[in-house]
């Protein structure tokens, strides 16, 4: 039976096809379903299947079968339309139009077949994108004429127009070439008069609700781009405002009015805007008085709630663009303030989604005229302070059962909301610092006297206080914070109950962490705060200790010099006092918290400029871990088996992690400590490595997953990480780190080569990448040794497939990149076999779908290409690899999985096309090429045309040639070279109907940088704790 379906030489058996589709969607057995699936796939992939579509649509009774047929048709229209003969194209066009008219001219069939008609509309719009305006210039007049013949046809015509507008204006980027988009936009613009007349005619003449709604939806899609005269010099606005009071059309009308409110073009239509706003406000008061908004939202249907949300959008758009024109006369000002009252009323609705948008509208408006708006602004400040969202640093939250717990997952929506609310509150605070400060202190005193005390009230208040850090002048900030911190510490003393104390502790920590400038200027407060944090480090409530350690680190990073200077009234610097009580302070902390603590103290010691003192502090800081280390190494020298004890292994791991934490913050000054443990550490590394290998050799691959082996490997990894951290941070003193390299060659590199694949640590690769990036050319003579130890054996691990050993992959290519960048000479000295391996592995890297591996591979390729170009060996190199690289790059460029690499693909291609001109030897093989080319550029042009011609059979030879010539002519101008490739990707249809934002990623990044520069101009918008300030805490 199925075979009968596959034979397309005669009309298809529609009843059988219906049965197959029913089996696929139906409840038949699994076998039936998969057989049906296979048949349908084969039919879909058959290039002649589309010729059966009309026959199927006419005879099938099953909606799913019709959809299947339309799917086949849609892919032909998308990918093969221009290759079809004219009569076939006209046949499809006329057939689709006829079926649409036939189904939509009758009310009953139109409602019954709604889904089918919608799909047909989409197909028609796909055809239009190819045919209109050039080959179907009468389309809009025909459509308008048809619409006037019946109300249901008219309703469907509106749906088609809406689809067309969306396809051209909203979804066209990356779907059509830039030239085509331009052409369609100007066609729609020039023919809009007919559509406009039709819409007005319908709205004035019909009584049918469905038709009015369809017309409004179409208008909504058109309003953002149509010529302005059609809006303001016609009865359109009055017509819309007539529909506004009618409940059934209220939301649609409001959406249309919001589109109009969002338009901007000089002062020409100011009077019309004022008139529109005034009429709108009169009607709105009758529909929804401002004081009833929160109740109306809480008790309203979803339609009514949507109305209030749309109202917020209308006001924000209107105020953003046209607020000034309402400020001129007293009666307009009254209407304006009433509008603001509506907006603030909507802000008090219990729906977090609504606050950010509203804040946008009011924030911009207001910096201009403070007097007029002082009332609404003060209400808005109150709202922001009561409703502040939770910042990222706060780890202590209330769960659904009302218990205070540690946060387990970050909520991104809340973080986005916090960012918007914080910016708004900073603007509001700049507008009136006094009012901001009064409102905050007043709320805080109500917390203290218990009148307003609740976890939520205290949280939002403290989050708001923390969020405006940096927006006040220093003197005012000092006065304000002295009161805030004093009150919060008092509150902590007088409040009873574990949970209450945890909430207050979390808020104290958040606030002090936000104000480093204040703490630097007030040693007494800084000392009190740090001692309070030490107190919280003994508090066993979940989350409090973590937050105490995080806040301690944050404060130390910003005020480190204060802790090593002897302050007035103190007997010794704070760091010395801290080191004396170190054991008690960290007694209750978990290992990971101790590491954070040690990192913080490392920052303090790093600020000490006297070498002798610094070394002494380091010795005191490390005395606990060093004692334990010496003890373990001493026992091991008696009996080596002690090192196999799991508790001992854990201790070794913990000691190494503590060392890494200090190395990361202390930088080059960690030298005395690492020298102390370095050789013993390598001995332990080698021993653990042999233990891992022998365990895996005896127990097979399963052994590598046992907890014992995992623990041993953690120690190896941490050793490598410690050395890497130290080398990386020792930038001022490169010779110091260099002396650690020779002793590592055998225990680390030799060990990597000798081990079984499952026991090789990827950190070896990243350690040597760091070393080469650090010591650059000095490592040249070591590269062959590194190459020999890791290259071949790692490649065997990672080239079996794209999944195994993900860590090794990225780090291997990073190591290659370091060698290619800093020790390029070493690559030139490789044998041709080895160099081929390198280039093959780079091709392998950028074929990865894992984004960072592909990007590392592409960046490395670009470096190597540039280095070879300048090396004197460019002719041999490019003769061997030019064509392979070009072919590989085109393969990933036109493969949708590799879209994120677009920017680098373009740069590699540009380099290849530019380098051709400088080569003196032919790239082609004279024996296999039938005739001689005059130069390389001609050969590359021909080769590229052939390559793309065979890869994209759906493109004509002319199109491909035009593209290649365009590439060669624009190769020295990157932006037009890039646009040329974008258009080609759309044309080749490899990239249509998908998300193409990766092709525009660079432009988006430039936009983000401009936004950051703008934020830097307003004090406080970028929080002081995030700024990379050079510590001014002398």
Image (tube, rainbow, N blue to C red):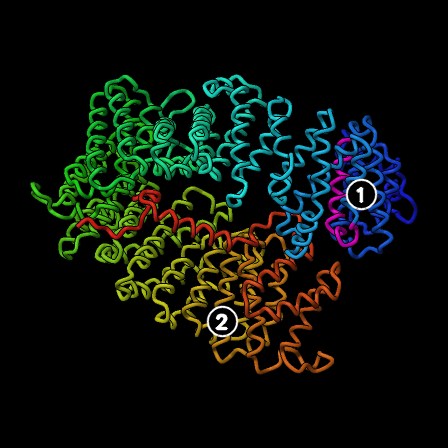
**Of 635 and 507, the residue lying toward us:** 507
Residue occupying the point 39% across, 20% down: 402
Q: Which dot marks residue 866?
A: 2
Q: Residue at left 78%, top 41%?
A: 143
User: In the image, residue 963 lies at what x, y percent?
Assistant: 67, 65
For the record, the magenta segment spans 113-137
Q: Residues within 10 Å of mark 2 (few under 14, many from 20)?
A: some
Q: Secondary structure at mark 1?
A: helix
Q: Residue at x 70, y 30 (%)?
A: 203
Residue 133: say if magenta.
yes
When the figure is inspected, residue 445 is found, relative to residue 87, above or below; the finding is above
Pointer 1 residue: 142
Residue in the foreground of this view, choosing between 703 and 70: 70
Q: Residue 650 at what x, y percent from top left?
A: 33, 43
Whether residue 162 is visible to the viewer of this picture, yes or no, is: yes
User: Along the horizontal axis of the image, is 585 left or right of 660?
Assistant: left
Quick check: 776 left or right of 146? left
Q: Position of residue 378 (x, y in %)?
A: 34, 28
In the image, is residue 513 part of the stretch drawn in magenta? no
């Amino acid at each position: 039976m199925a075979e009968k379906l596959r034979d397309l030489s005669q009309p298809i058996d529609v009843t059988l096809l219906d049965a197959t589709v029913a089996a696929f969607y139906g409840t038949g057995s699994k076998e039936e379903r998969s057989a049906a699936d296979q048949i349908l796939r084969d039919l879909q992939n058959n290039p002649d299947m589309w010729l059966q579509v009309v026959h199927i649509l006419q005879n099938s009774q099953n909606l799913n079968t019709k959809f299947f047929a339309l799917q086949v048709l849609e892919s032909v229209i998308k990918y093969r339309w221009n290759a079809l003969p004219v009569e076939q194209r006209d046949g499809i066009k006329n057939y689709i139009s006829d079926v649409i008219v036939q189904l939509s001219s009758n009310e009953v069939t139109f409602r019954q077949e709604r889904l089918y008609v919608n799909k047909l509309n989409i197909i028609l719009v796909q055809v239009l994108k190819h045919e209109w305006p050039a080959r179907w210039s009468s389309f809009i007049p025909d459509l308008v004429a048809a619409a006037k013949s019946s109300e249901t046809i008219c309703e469907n015509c509106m749906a088609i127009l809406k689809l067309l507008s969306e396809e051209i204006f909203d979804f066209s980027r990356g779907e059509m070439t830039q030239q085509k988009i331009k052409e369609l936009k100007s066609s729609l613009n020039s023919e809009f008069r007919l559509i406009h007349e039709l819409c007005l005619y319908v709205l004035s003449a019909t009584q049918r609700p469905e038709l009015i709604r369809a017309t409004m939806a179409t208008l909504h899609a058109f309003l953002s781009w149509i010529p302005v005269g059609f809006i303001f010099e016609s009865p359109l606005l009055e017509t819309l405002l007539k529909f506004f009071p009618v409940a059934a059309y209220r939301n649609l009308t409001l959406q249309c009015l919001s589109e109009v409110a969002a338009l901007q073009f000089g002062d020409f239509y100011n009077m019309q805007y004022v008139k529109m706003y005034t009429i709108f406000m009169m009607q709105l008061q009758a529909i929804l008085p401002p004081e009833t908004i929160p109740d109306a939202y809480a008790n309203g249907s979803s339609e009514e709630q949507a109305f209030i949300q749309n109202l917020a959008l209308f006001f924000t758009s209107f105020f953003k663009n046209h607020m000034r024109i309402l400020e001129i006369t007293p009666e307009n000002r009254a209407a304006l303030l009433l509008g603001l009252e509506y907006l603030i009323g909507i802000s008090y609705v219990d729906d977090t989604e609504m606050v950010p948008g509203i804040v946008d509208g009011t924030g911009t408006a207001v910096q201009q005229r403070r007097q007029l708006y002082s009332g609404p602004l003060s209400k808005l400040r109150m709202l922001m302070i009561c409703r502040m969202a939770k910042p990222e640093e706060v780890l202590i939250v209330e769960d659904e059962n009302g218990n205070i717990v540690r946060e387990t997952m970050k909520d991104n929506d809340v973080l986005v909301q916090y960012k918007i609310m914080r910016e708004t509150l900073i603007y509001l605070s700049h507008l009136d610092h006094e009012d901001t400060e009064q409102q905050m202190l007043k709320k805080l005193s109500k917390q203290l006297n218990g009148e307003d005390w609740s976890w939520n009230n205290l949280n939002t208040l403290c989050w708001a206080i923390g969020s405006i850090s940096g927006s006040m002048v220093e003197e005012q900030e000092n006065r304000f914070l002295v009161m805030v911190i004093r009150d919060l510490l008092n509150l902590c003393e007088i409040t009873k109950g574990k949970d209450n104390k945890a909430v207050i502790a979390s808020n104290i920590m958040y606030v002090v962490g936000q104000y480093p400038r204040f703490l630097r200027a007030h040693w007494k407060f800084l000392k009190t705060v740090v001692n309070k944090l030490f107190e919280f480090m003994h508090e066993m409530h979940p989350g409090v200790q973590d937050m105490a350690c995080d806040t301690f680190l944050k404060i130390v990073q910003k005020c480190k010099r204060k802790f090593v200077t002897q302050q007035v009234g103190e007997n010794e610097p704070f760091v010395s006092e801290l080191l004396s009580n170190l054991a008690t302070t960290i007694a209750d902390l978990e290992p990971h918290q101790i590491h954070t603590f040690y990192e913080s103290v490392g920052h303090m010691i790093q600020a000490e400029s006297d070498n002798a003192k610094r070394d002494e502090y380091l010795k005191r800081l490390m005395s606990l871990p060093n004692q334990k280390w010496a003890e373990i190494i001493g026992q091991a020298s008696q009996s080596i088996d002690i090192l196999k004890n799991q508790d001992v292994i854990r201790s070794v791991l913990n000691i190494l992690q503590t060392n890494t934490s200090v190395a990361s913050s202390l930088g080059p000054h960690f030298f005395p400590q690492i020298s102390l443990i370095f050789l013993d550490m390598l001995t332990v590394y080698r021993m653990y490595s042999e233990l891992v290998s022998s365990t895996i050799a005896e127990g097979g691959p399963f052994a590598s997953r046992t907890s014992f082996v995992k623990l041993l490997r953690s120690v190896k990894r941490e050793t490598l990480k410690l050395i890497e951290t130290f080398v990386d941070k020792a930038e001022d003193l490169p010779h110091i780190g260099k002396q650690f390299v020779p002793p590592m060659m055998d225990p680390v590199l030799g060990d990597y080569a000798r081990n079984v694949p499952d026991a090789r640590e990827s950190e070896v690769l990243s350690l040597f990448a760091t070393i080469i990036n650090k010591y650059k050319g000095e490592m040249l003579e070591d590269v062959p040794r590194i190459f020999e130890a890791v290259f071949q054996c790692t490649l065997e691990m990672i080239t079996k497939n794209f999944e195994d050993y993900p860590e090794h992959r990225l780090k291997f290519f990073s190591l290659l990149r370091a060698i290619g960048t800093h020790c390029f000479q070493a690559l030139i000295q490789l044998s041709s076999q080895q160099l081929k391996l390198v280039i093959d592995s780079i091709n392998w890297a950028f074929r990865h779908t894992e984004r960072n591996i592909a990007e590392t591979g592409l960046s490395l390729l670009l470096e190597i290409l540039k280095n070879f170009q300048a090396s004197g060996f460019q002719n041999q190199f490019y003769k061997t690899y030019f064509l392979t690289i070009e072919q590989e790059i085109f393969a990933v460029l036109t493969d949708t999985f590799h879209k994120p690499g677009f920017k680098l693909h373009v740069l590699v291609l540009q380099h290849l096309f530019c380098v051709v001109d400088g080569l003196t030897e032919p790239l082609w093989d004279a024996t296999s090429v039938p005739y001689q080319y005059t130069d390389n550029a001609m050969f590359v042009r021909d080769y590229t045309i052939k390559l793309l011609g065979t890869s994209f059979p759906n493109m004509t030879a002319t199109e491909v040639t035009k593209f290649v010539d365009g590439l060669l002519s624009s190769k020295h101008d990157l932006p037009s070279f890039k646009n040329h490739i974008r258009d080609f990707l759309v044309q080749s249809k490899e990239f249509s109907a998908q998300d193409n934002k990766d092709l525009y990623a660079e432009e988006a990044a430039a936009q983000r940088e401009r936004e950051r520069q703008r934020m830097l101009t307003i004090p406080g918008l970028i929080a002081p704790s995030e700024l990379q300030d050079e510590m001014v805490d002398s």
